[in-house]
Image (spheres, grey):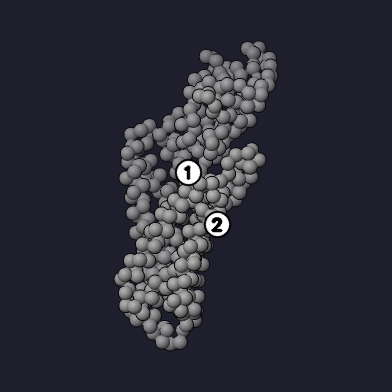
């Protein structure tokens, strides 16, 4: 039976690889065409476009895994059916449940691949893609993971440790120099927020350095900060939920709760990341009744078309439904899990009809 597992799994894996290559090519080409419109802005050139597209590949792969699993499994089993191999396998006494077990083994491989890409590859690559794109479009800004965001504002150099989703700034350091490049003051604020068309710095500590080297320290609960740095500039480095791993999302949700901020978008991303591997497994199961149902009815082409359309519809609905639910104040877990649950119930119903 291990030979059967390897044969079925290998066939599905080959077909899924072809589907993966085709879908990745289509989606990456769409990203490439979209980015061409920004060539010539700042330092954004063709090389920057290719870099952005390449770094976007893990995100696209992660999001399309369920669709690849469904279409690849349908095509793999269909190729076995067209060669009468499934008929021979069934005639030799192998039950549908046993074939399902072989299919689920390759489904387990898909689930592991989804988890690895989503947790270790996608967060890094997507952050690098967005940061590189923003840096090319905004030449005055430099940011990296170790030292935060650096901005030059006249004779001042500003360092922002982190930009939160609502454009709240954390760990702000402002270094001011005179015309002779002498450091005249240092300011540190734990938090900054944009209110009434001006930045407000909270818990500010200012150190003024005299020409002779003497320094004085002042503390303020809140001060206005007049700068050329705008919220639009900060939004280029906005931390989005899709860029974070499950562990990072959990930490951010804890932080946002402690500061009485809205955590629902992060909860949605958290539950979507947890349910995506399950969606991939459900897609694999859903492919079985499509293929075996076509064996009985003789409507292979029609069922293949329907199966592919289900994959496409699920891809669109899974991306959009959660945010629609958030707009009506429904729990994020419902928005993330409901499409998968509906698909799972449909897969079980169809499976029982062919079993």
Q: Quick one: which residue is furthest to the front in this view?
A: 328
SS at mark 1 in the image? helix
Horizontally, residue 303 falls left or right of residue 97, namely left
Figure quadrant of residue 89: bottom left
| Residue depicted at x 65% and y 20% | 207
Q: Mark 2 — residue? A: 274
Seen in the picture, residue 133 relative to 66 is either above or below; the reply is above
Rendered image: mark on residue 43: none
Image quarter for residue 86? bottom left
Please give left or right for residue 332 compared with residue 91 in the image.
Answer: right
Determine the image quadrant of residue 20.
Answer: bottom left
Mark 2 or 1, closer to the camera: 2
Considering depth in this image, is 105 or 167 the residue closer to the camera? 167
Please, is residue 64 above or below residue 220 in the view? below
In front of the other: 30 or 42: 30
Label 2 – label 1 distance at C-alpha: 23 Å
Q: Residue at x 46, y 74 (%)?
A: 351
Image spot of residue 212 (x, y percent): 66, 12
Question: Which element type, helix, strand or loop, lies under badge 2?
Answer: helix
On screen, residue 9 above or below 61: below
Label 2: few (<14), some or many (≥20) within 10 Å?
some
**Residue 344 in sight here:** yes
Q: Is residue 57 above or below residue 290?
A: above
Residue at figure coordinates x 36%, y 73% from the top left: 78
Left or right: 329 as drawn, with respect to 291: right
Q: Earlier in the sequence, mark 2 or mark 1?
A: 1
Which residue is found at the position 39% from the left and 58% from the top?
Answer: 313
Residue of label 1: 128
């Amino acid at each position: 039976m291990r030979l059967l597992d390897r044969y079925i799994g290998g066939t599905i894996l080959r077909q899924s690889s072809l589907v993966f290559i085709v879908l990745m090519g289509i989606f990456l080409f769409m990203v490439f065409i979209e980015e061409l419109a920004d060539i010539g802005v700042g330092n954004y050139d063709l090389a920057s476009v290719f870099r952005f597209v390449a770094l976007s590949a893990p995100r696209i792969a992660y999001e399309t895994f369920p669709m690849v699993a469904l279409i690849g499994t349908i095509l793999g089993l269909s190729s076995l059916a067209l060669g009468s191999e499934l008929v021979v396998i069934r005639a030799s006494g192998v039950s549908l449940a046993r074939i399902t077990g072989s299919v689920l083994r390759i489904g387990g491989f898909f689930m592991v691949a989804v988890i690895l890409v989503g947790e270790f590859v996608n967060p890094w690559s997507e952050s690098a893609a967005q940061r590189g794109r923003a840096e090319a479009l905004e030449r005055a800004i430099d940011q990296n993971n170790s030292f935060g965001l650096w901005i030059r504002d006249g004779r001042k150099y500003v360092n922002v440790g982190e930009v939160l989703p609502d454009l709240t700034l954390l760990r702000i350091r402002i270094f001011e120099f005179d015309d002779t490049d002498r450091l005249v003051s240092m300011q540190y604020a734990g938090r900054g927020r944009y209110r009434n068309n001006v930045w407000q710095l909270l818990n500010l500590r200012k150190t003024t350095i005299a020409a002779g080297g003497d320094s004085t320290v002042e503390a303020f609960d809140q001060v206005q900060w007049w700068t050329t740095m705008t919220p639009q500039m900060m939004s280029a480095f906005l931390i989005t939920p899709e860029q974070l791993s499950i562990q990072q999302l959990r930490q951010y949700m804890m932080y946002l709760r402690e500061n009485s901020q809205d955590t629902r978008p992060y909860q949605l991303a958290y539950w979507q990341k947890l349910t995506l591997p399950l969606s991939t497994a459900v897609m694999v199961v859903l492919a079985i009744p499509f293929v075996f149902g076509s064996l009985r009815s003789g409507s292979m082409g029609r069922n293949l078309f329907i199966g592919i359309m289900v994959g496409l519809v699920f891809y669109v609905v899974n991306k959009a439904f959660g945010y629609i639910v958030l707009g009506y104040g429904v729990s994020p877990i419902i928005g993330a899990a409901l499409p998968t649950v509906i698909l799972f119930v449909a897969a079980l119903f169809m499976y029982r009809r062919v079993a």
